[in-house]
Image (spheres, helix red, strand yellow):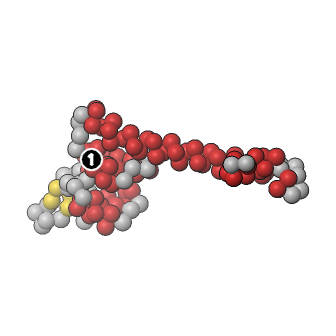
Amino acid sequence: MKSSQHNGAGTLSIGALAAQFGMATHVLRHWEAMGLLHPGRDAGGRRRYGPDDLTRVATILVLKEAGLGLTTIGSLSTTVDRATRQEILRPAAEELRSRIAAAQASLALIEGGLNCEHEEVTRCPNYQRLIAERTGS
């Protein structure tokens, strides 16, 4: 690793940290502006990221992959109370359950089309059932 990216104190530059996670440096600056990251600074005022920052970035990425927004992630990072954490996560869990149900319904429709032996899709009993449910007939 170049000396401009890593100093002897075990810290990373913003560029090195961003590269480690395959992201742009402006993302890390944005997260810092939102209060999600708090990097140290060297004598020249440049950001320096240590092992705790590495863990924090990985945590943010995992939570984003789970569907949480940065505001929610920020709220989670400032609470140590279990009840508050549950309050924060409950709506996210409900939204995710809803998206999973919609995805399962979509998959059922597509699999029904793949498995239907009718030449014309409108004659497929699965298709007719789905349309009847949608139209209320």
Q: Position of residue 42 (x, y in %)?
A: 14, 60
Q: In front here: 54 or 4?
A: 54
Q: Position of residue 102 (x, y in %)?
A: 58, 48
| 64 lies left or right of 137 | left
Name which quarter of the figure residue 84 lies in. top left
Q: Position of residue 61 (x, y in %)?
A: 38, 51
From this viewpoint, which residue is outermost toward the front? 137
Q: Could you tell me which residue is drawn at 33 percent across and 54 percent down?
A: 70
> Which residue is denoted by mark 1 in the rendering?
75
Residue 78 in view (yes/no): yes
Q: In front here: 58 or 45?
A: 58
Please state, as top left, top right, bottom left or bottom right, where the N terminus lies in the image. bottom left
Q: Secondary structure at mark 1?
A: helix
Q: Could you tell me which residue is drawn at 45 percent across and 42 percent down?
A: 94
From this viewpoint, which residue is outermost toward the top? 82
Q: Could you tell me which residue is drawn at 30 percent across and 53 percent down?
A: 71
Q: Which amino acid lies under the numbered mark 1 shown in the image of this protein?
A: Ser
Name which quarter of the figure residue 122 lies in. bottom right
Is residue 121 positioned above or below 77 on the image? below
Q: Position of residue 17 (x, y in %)?
A: 31, 58
